[in-house]
């Protein structure tokens, strides 16, 4: 599904070059569940932005489902995001003026899907995340956990190849965070490829693989069952 070869991401800060990624090699199989962690400045957020086609590598190669991302135009990159990627953010990023249904339908509008088909998909996804009775509510009428479920439903509306989650439980209490991770685990078991950034070891443990970043490089990759058995992520 995803292949990185010698990927660098360099930013110019004043008169210095800062290497956020410094030659990363990585393969992510279709249907797998990954957690990316690391200290501040390790490169984990840059990695997620690059995987989500929100940024491009300075050098190196990135293939998504066999397509060379580094060689695409801006319009092609936008199309790839719209068709193949779903995003879940720590702060939900729901539009407060829109209902649950309208928030879920929003990505479909940009794909030219409207009317009865958009409604059908939104209703099905709301049911899938346990919010079938909340379609007419606005985000301010929902709890944090419910808002995150709406965000997940919205991210799934285009049936993405890859679901990317940036600290999906960061603004939630422990019990609510566990319910969100149970939902992501269910989506993984149904075959969805999930890549999540988190700083919380107990949240990373839900993933199939744990990748730890350090100084712009992949420091380690371990299966979560190996970490639980006493390994170091």
Image: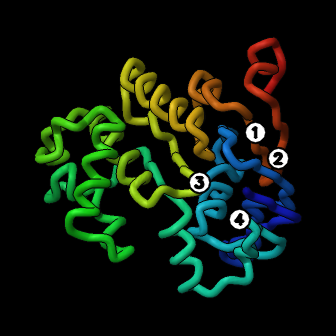
Is residue 143 in sight in this rendering? Answer: yes
Q: How is the image coloured?
A: rainbow
From the viewer's side, name the closer residue of 86 and 39: 86
> Quick one: SS at disc 3?
strand
From the viewer's side, name the closer residue of 223 and 48: 223
Is residue 94 in sight in this rendering? Answer: no
Q: Which residue is mark 2?
A: 218
| 13 relative to 171, above or below | below
Whichever of labels 2 and 1 marks the residue nearer the N terminus, that label is 1
Residue 102: where, in percent of width, then height?
21, 58
Q: Label 4 vs label 3: CA separation? A: 9 Å
Whichever of labels 2 and 3 marks the residue nearer the N terminus, that label is 3
Tag on residue 212?
1
Q: Label 2 vs label 3: CA separation? A: 20 Å
Q: Label 2 vs label 1: CA separation? A: 6 Å
Q: Which residue is mark 4?
A: 64
Q: Label 4 vs label 2: CA separation? A: 19 Å
Tag on residue 117?
none
| 12 relative to 102, above or below | below
Do callouts 4 and 3 mark residues in contact (Cβ within 8 Å)?
Answer: yes
| 174 relative to 118, above or below | above
**Residue 24 located left or right of residue 136:** right
**Residue drawn 80% across and 67% down?**
8
> Quick one: SS at disc 2?
strand
């Amino acid at each position: 599904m995803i292949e990185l070869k010698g990927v660098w991401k360099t930013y110019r800060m004043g008169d210095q070059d800062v290497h956020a990624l410094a030659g990363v090699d990585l393969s992510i199989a279709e249907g797998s569940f990954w957690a990316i962690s690391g200290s501040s400045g390790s490169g984990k957020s840059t990695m997620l932005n690059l995987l989500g086609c929100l940024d491009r590598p300075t050098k190196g190669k990135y293939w998504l489902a066999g397509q060379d991302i580094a060689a695409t135009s801006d319009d092609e990159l936008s199309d790839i995001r719209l068709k193949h990627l779903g995003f879940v953010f720590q702060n939900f990023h729901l539009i407060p003026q829109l209902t649950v249904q309208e928030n879920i339908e929003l990505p479909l509008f940009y794909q030219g899907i409207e009317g009865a088909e958009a409604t059908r998909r939104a209703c099905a996804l709301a049911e899938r995340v346990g919010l079938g009775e909340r379609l007419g509510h606005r985000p301010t009428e929902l709890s944090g956990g419910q808002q995150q479920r709406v965000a997940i439903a919205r991210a799934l509306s285009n049936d993405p190849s890859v679901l990317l989650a940036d600290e999906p439980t960061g603004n939630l209490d422990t019990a609510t965070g566990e319910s969100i991770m149970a939902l992501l685990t269910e989506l993984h078991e149904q075959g969805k490829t999930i890549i999540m950034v988190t700083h919380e070891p107990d949240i990373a443990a839900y993933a199939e693989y744990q990748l730890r970043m350090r100084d712009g490089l992949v420091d380690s990759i371990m299966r979560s069952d190996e970490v639980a058995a006493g390994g170091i992520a």
